[in-house]
Image (tube, rainbow, N blue to C red):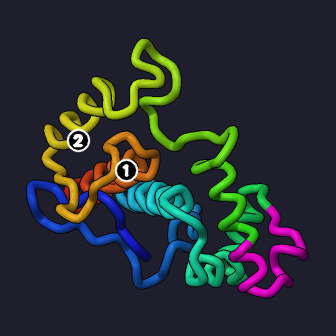
Amino acid sequence: QRTAMLDGYRGQRCQSRARGGIMNAIVDLTLGSVAEETRERSNLYAFLAAIYRSEVTAELLHQLREPRFRAALSAAGVTLDDEFLNRSDDALLEDLAVEYTRLFVGPGKHIPPYASVHGGKDGGDLYGRSTARLRDFIAGAGIAYQSSYKGMADHICVELEFMTKLTALRAAAESAGR
């Protein structure tokens, strides 16, 4: 699992639960404690960040096809059809990459995955005040951008990663009894 944009809280690197892969984001929805439920919410944000970050990778596709993940999706009312499950990886990855590009990159009509493009008084103001305010808000929460990240602060995957970090911190605090 890749993390993209954010480093950890107050300069410490936060690590996602990569051992179990992305599928941990949805699996085991019958948890009892607030800490466990918050940790699962963090995993769900991480899953969504991976989906919006870039085209589906072969690793993510493999995880999506695993029975445990499909069962969790089914419990949430989502069913993957036979075409998704039975097509060759190469053909499906190509189609998913084309669809991701069509939806989020262009050319032509597409949905830019940046908050500053949509609504509000600053709508359509890429790299404008709303982007700067979000960057400052994230920094004010003590979470830094990875030095290698050159993208915009208001990309939806950055916002989802921010929520991943916040909910992971809350889960840790709940586990510690704070």
Image quarter where the N terminus lies is bottom left
Q: Is residue 12 above or below residue 84?
A: above
**With 152 as the anchor, is 51 left or right in this view?**
right
Residue at x 51%, y 43% (from the top left corner): 113
Of helix, strand and loop, which one carries label 2? helix
Closest to the observer: 18 or 83?
83
- Residue at 82% across / 74% down in the picture? 84
Q: Indicate which disc residue 86 carries.
A: none
Q: Which badge, 1 or 2, is on the more N-terminal residue?
A: 2
Q: Is residue 158 above or below residue 54?
A: above
User: Is residue 97 toward the left or the right of residue 44 in the image?
Assistant: right
CA neighbours of label 1 inside 10 A, class few (<14), some (14 to 19), many (20+): many
Classify residue 145 by image quadrant: bottom left
**Main structural element of the magenta stretch: helix, strand or loop?**
helix
Q: Is residue 167 left or right of residue 135?
A: right
- In percent of width and height, residue 92 lies at 76, 76
Which residue in the protein does label 1 denote? 158
The residue that disc 2 covers is: 138
Give the magenta-colored segment's residue range: 79-94
- Depth check, front residue: 139 or 74: 139
- State whether residue 111 appears in this view: yes
Residue plotted at (50% across, 63% down) = 50
In the image, what residue type sits under mark 2? Answer: Ile
Disc 1 to disc 2: CB gap under 8 Å:
yes
